[in-house]
Image (cartoon, rainbow, N blue to C red):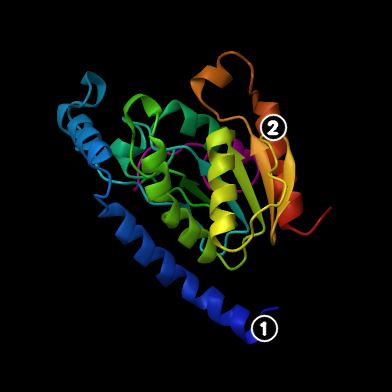
Amino acid sequence: MAGPIHSIRARSAAPAALAALDAEIAACRACPRLVAWREEVARVRVARFAAETYWGRPVPGFGDPAARILVVGLAPAAHGGNRTGRVFTGDRSGDVLFAAMHRAGLARLATSTGRDDGQALAGCRVAAAVRCAPPANRPTPDERDRCLPYLVREMAALPDLRVIVALGAFGWDAALRAAAGLGHACLSRPRFAHAGEARVGPWTLLGCYHPSQQNTFTGRLTPAMLDAVLARARDLAEGEA
């Protein structure tokens, strides 16, 4: 078990480690198909954002270096994170997620519109399993695997991490793979379920339907359901059973 001196050093090193990781992610060009797609979207744009300059690069994680909760989604939206440069920012899924995080006391603002909007997270960080916007929102298995080390390193750089909230089956799978990369493989692989829980090494993994329009417009995921998952995450992060 890590001693108090090790823990203090890990906490003090977290901001620099995450900043270095974020810079490395933003410069990544490892997947030719994703590079071509994200840059084409940034160049062509859509009418409603025609006057904006798109980020057009991989999107790093965002949030508190002292996070006890890590929210893992699928990938940036083509005209959301790929435009704004912040994960879950500037798209409908992010509108739902950040509003819920604000209600849970994890986000300063109920909206997230851009990197200079004053948004901040407390005790929480948000990341994506794949850091580039993929065509049709579907990364290939090779792209998924090539991006996984970034999530492994992000989890390793969060010394206070206790809870991982996986948005959808893709985020669930990524979290399990990343945990295995850190030496915490599950002998019996738990299956994704909304509000499902699994103990993975030192972390609790919580499942939540992804706040996509497909789920929120159909009522498969309601605000109350998302609130309940985040409330459970807070309880676990604060040491309550």
Query: According to the image, label 2 marks what residue?
Result: 193
Residues rendered magenta in the picture: 100-116
Is residue 12 in sight in this rendering?
yes
- Residue at figure coordinates x 62%, y 78% from the top left: 7
Q: Residues within 10 Å of mark 1 (few under 14, many from 20)?
A: few
- Residue at figure coordinates x 47%, y 48% from the top left: 127
Main SS class of the magenta portion in the image: loop
Q: Quadrant of residue 224?
A: top right
* Amino acid at pointer 1: Pro
Query: Which residue ends up furthest to the top in the rendered image?
Result: 218
Query: According to the image, label 1 marks what residue?
Result: 4
Task: Locate residue 53 relative to residue 199 in the image: left or right.
Answer: left
Q: Position of residue 165 (x, y in %)?
A: 62, 44
Q: Vertically, is 41 above or below 213?
A: below
Q: Position of residue 6 (x, y in %)?
A: 60, 83
Query: Dot 1 lies on which element?
Result: helix
* Amino acid at pointer 2: Ala
